[in-house]
Amino acid sequence: MHRPGGNARAGMEQVLSTPSTIPRARHEPHEVPASEPGLASAGRTMDAFGRHIHYLRVSLTDKCNLRCVYCMPEQMVFRPSDELLSDEELFTVLRATSLLGFDKYRLTGGEPTVRPNLVGIVGEIARMPGVREITMTTNGLRLANLAVPLRQAGLQRVNVSLDSLDEQKYHRLTRWGHVGDVLAGINAAEAVGMHPVKINCVVIRGYNEDSMTDLARLTYEHDWQVRFLEVMPFADVADFQQASIVTTQEMMRYIESTVDRLVELNDGKLDGEARLYRLPGARGEIGFISPVTVPFCASCSRVRLTADGTLRLCLLKDGELDLKTPLRRGAGVDELAELMRMAIWHKPWGHDLSHGVIPQNRIMSEIGG
Ligand code: SAM
Ligand code: SF4
């Protein structure tokens, strides 16, 4: 991993408040995997547990214009650009996923808006056959200027990360950012019709628990989906992340005690990875994403492409398929598709955080959240 672990880690530990351990997860029951790799049926790519895999999260870069405390150290050292996939290499991999029946793409990072030619990349994905959905997760800082060209290129929606409306708290969490820039980005996305705008807030003990109140209240005025996320542990940052996790249960109690009761939507069923609620009388929705305490592995339909060209089968497990080496050897779309199809068959069932298994080889920004 490309970062000076020692100093950064010491910095992380200084800001710990209430230490806790990872709460035990309520794992869904899962089926015994099939033993024979099956061919994709009718253009569908399946894993051994019978899950239809058709959603790719594409990390366009490991670089970022923020340094969120729960994501990366301030002195983060990024990969040299020649280790990342070029546009042409990226398009070859994407075409291979299209061949496998993928129809949903989310651009992420690092910060996707710092990748050169982002608009051209969106346009290229939009032109691939069978694509139903192109979305992006961003910190929003550059969105005010990019919303119009991104929309014209085919981007349908954005999730914007905003951990607090309080300037000082936001700055303490992100180290470098300003709330006003993010809100300008959100408004620009809404103005160009990227509905509904989703706002992601990772809740960190000792940093922004009380910011949940104002963020939840945004849904009275705006038709937005405000989602609160449990922080997940990765590699060198894991100690900080484990010590600062606020569980969904705690988040819900906090919002109900400071704002109003939460009315369950969708019969309690997942919408993507979120469970949805509404405050009585509110226009927007509130979502909770609980990867640690209530994993949603049973309904997982995704794999991830890292910016340096590996296919990551599960966010929270280290198993990856190297695509860059075959690509740079001259592999084409068909060969890459076959490699991916075989790897996806072996996608692990899910994570084992509650048994102490923490991903070690990359942090979130290097995988693509
Ligand atoms: N830079 C973009 C952003 O911040 O939205 C996209 C990449 S970021 C890695 C994607 C999402 O992951 C963000 O909503 C961020 O808050 C979240 N995130 C980062 N580290 C996390 C962690 N350790 N646990 C849970 N969520 C995390
Ligand atoms: Fe950058 Fe997103 Fe990580 Fe924050 S969460 S440091 S914005 S990649």
Image: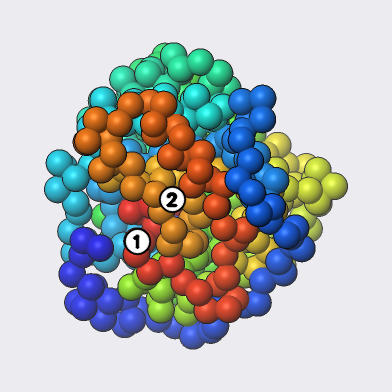
For label 1, the SS is: loop
Split into 4 quadrants, where in the image is the N terminus? bottom left
Three-letter amino acid code at the position of disc 1: Arg
Whether disc 2's CB lies below 8 Å from ligand 1 is answered no
Q: Answer few, some or many: residues within 10 Å of disc 2's Cα (few below 14, many 20 plus, some between 14 and 19).
A: many
User: In the image as oriented, which residue stretches furthest toward the front?
Assistant: 36
> For residue 312, which numbered disc appears in the image?
2
| Residue 93, image quadrant | top left
Q: Residue at x 58, y 22 (%)?
A: 132
Left or right of 225 in this view: 303: left
Q: Position of residue 322 (x, y in %)?
A: 33, 47
Q: Position of residue 237 (x, y in %)?
A: 36, 71
Q: Which residue is mark 1?
A: 362
Q: Position of residue 199 (x, y in %)?
A: 53, 44
For label 2, the SS is: strand
94 and 71: which is toward the camera: 94
Q: Residue at x 61, y 25 (%)?
A: 43
Q: Position of residue 195 (x, y in %)?
A: 58, 27
Say above or below: 179 vs 326: below
